[in-house]
Image (cartoon, rainbow, N blue to C red):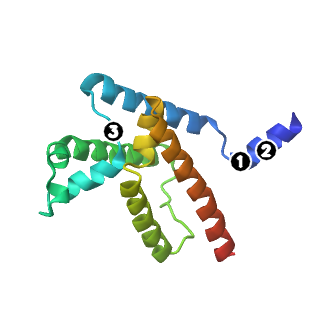
Amino acid sequence: MTETLTLSSSLFPLGWQHYLLGGLLIGSGVVLLFALTGLIGGMSTVFSSSWSFVSKRAFFQQARLTGSRVWRLVYAAGLVLGAGIWWLAFSDGTPLRTEVPAGLLLVGGFLVGYGARLGNGCTSGHGICGLGSLQWPSLLAVLTFMGTAFLTANLVAWWLA
């Protein structure tokens, strides 16, 4: 029992309850979106549909992107607003910082975007919506995302050490 408590406190030094609450809120939001509108929320499509406002390239002007860009933009705004509300309500007002260099964040962002396009969706689309609806391709995508994330995080930690 002591080993379990030690492992839990080392993995979750600030506790695990807020992770559970966050997961329940995200899951509830996705369920409500689907139950009330029949729409599936994933963030990589939000990115592509937002580009349809400014880019005339054929990819971004597909009907599936231009026809859904307004609700997807509202969806993204809700994500940003929710993060802002959390920060105001539960933080001490200290700006969030990272030790990861800006160049690595930029490269990582491009790789994640490329992977989301290659995987036909992102972790939110596959991991929350796809797994929630028991889609086999989403399980394979999530396993690939997570395996790659574990490998990358360990390689970056080794490289920065």
Q: Are marks 3 and 1 in contact (CB under 8 Å)?
A: no
Taking the spot 55% from the left edge, 70% from the top edge, the residue there is 100
CA gap between label 3 and label 2 equals 34 Å
Residue at the image point whose x is 45% and y is 72% from the top: 107
* Horizontal side, residue 51 vs residue 44: left or right: left
Earlier residue among tags 3 and 2:
2
Classify residue 97 as left or right of residue 126: right
For the view shown, which residue lies furthest in the top direction?
35
The three-letter code of the residue at mark 3 reads Gly
- Inspect the image, locate mark 1, and give the three-letter code of the amino acid beneath it: Leu
Quarter of the image with the C terminus is bottom right
Which residue is identified by label 1?
Answer: 11
Per the image, label 3 sits on a secondary structure element best described as loop
Q: Which residue is mark 3?
A: 41
Please tell me whether residue 148 is drawn above or below residue 2 in the rendered image: below
Could you tell me if the residues under marks 2 and 1 are in contact, i.e. CB atoms within 8 Å? yes
What element does badge 1 sit on?
Answer: helix
Picture quadrant where residue 51 is located: bottom left
- Rendered residue at 43%/59% (across/down): 115
Please name the amino acid that badge 2 sits on: Leu
Whether residue 81 is visible, yes or no, is yes
Q: Is residue 69 above or below residue 149?
A: above
Q: Secondary structure at mark 2?
A: helix
Q: Where, by quadrant of the figure, is residue 14 drawn?
A: top right
Residue labelled with disc 2: 7
Local crowd at mark 1 within 10 Å, few (<14), some, or many (≥20)?
few
**Image point (57%, 39%), residue name:** 19
Q: CA distance from mark 2 to mark 1?
A: 6 Å
Name, please, the residue furthest toward the right: 2
